[in-house]
Amino acid sequence: MAARRSSPRDRPNPYFRLRRSAIQGRGAIAIRRIPRFTRIIEYTGERITHEEADARYDDLSMKRHHTFLFTVNTRMVIDAAHGGNAARFINHSCEPNCEPIIVGHRVFIRSNRVIEPGEELSYDYNYEREEDDDAIAETLYACRCGSRRCRRTILSPRSPR
């Protein structure tokens, strides 16, 4: 019987382990020093349209917002709840130590500064703010990062008028 080849999804990430998060549920905690601009992990999952994402997840009917969606472009969204990897557990922060970079139709999470062992990895989700978003929307998309510059929502900052 031939040995099964392991895929990158099966191997532990060399930079972090999933553990209990101070921000939300499970989080990605650095297990070694990560240099600035290191590609840490690719955000994977099922590639779907925005219409399919809207059909799968109705924010208004949810008690609290919780999805693993990442917008790639105007036509494509990655749903990490379906075939996704550990990248889906990297939490939001208003003062993140990582950032997403989009290369073609792929999304990578990379460090934007040196990250020390024990730090939780995070990036700014920067959810697109709709014109009619109000305090209720900010509550639905509440932020729990606890940073000094926390804007209390994962919605993108309001643009100055």
Image (cartoon, grey):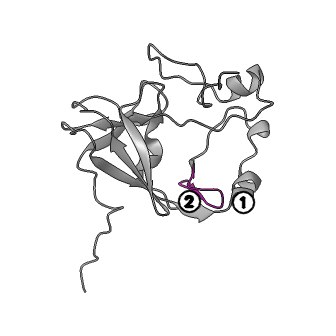
Q: Which residue is mark 1?
A: 52
Indicate whether residue 113 is drawn in magenta: no
Residue type, mark 1 in image: Glu
The x and y percentages for residue 61 are: 79, 39
Tell me: residue 114, above or below residue 82.
Answer: above
Pick the front one: 106 or 60: 106
Quarter of the image with the C terminus in it: top right
Q: Amino acid at mark 2?
A: His
Up/down of 99 relative to 141, above or below: below
Judge the density around disc 1: few (<14), some (14-19), many (≥20) Cα neighbours within 10 Å.
Answer: few
Circle 2 residues within 10 Å: few <14, some 14–19, many ≥20? few
The residue sitting at the bottom extreme is 1
Decide which of tag 2 and tag 1 comes sooner along the chain: 1
Is residue 69 left or right of 98 when viewed as pictured? right
Q: Position of residue 130 (x, y in %)?
A: 74, 35
Please count the marks in the image.
2
Tell me the CA gap for discs 2 and 1.
13 Å
Q: Quadrant of residue 117?
A: top left
Residue stretch in magenta: 70-81
Taking the spot 63% from the left edge, 63% from the top edge, the residue there is: 48
Identify the secondary structure beneath mark 2. loop
Nearest the viewer among 24 and 76 is 76
In the displayed image of the protein, which residue is found farthest to the left? Answer: 33
Which of pointers 2 and 1 indicates the residue nearer the eye?
Answer: 1
Q: Which residue in the protein does label 2 denote? A: 82
* Residues at marks 2 and 1 touching, judged by CB atoms closer than 8 Å: no
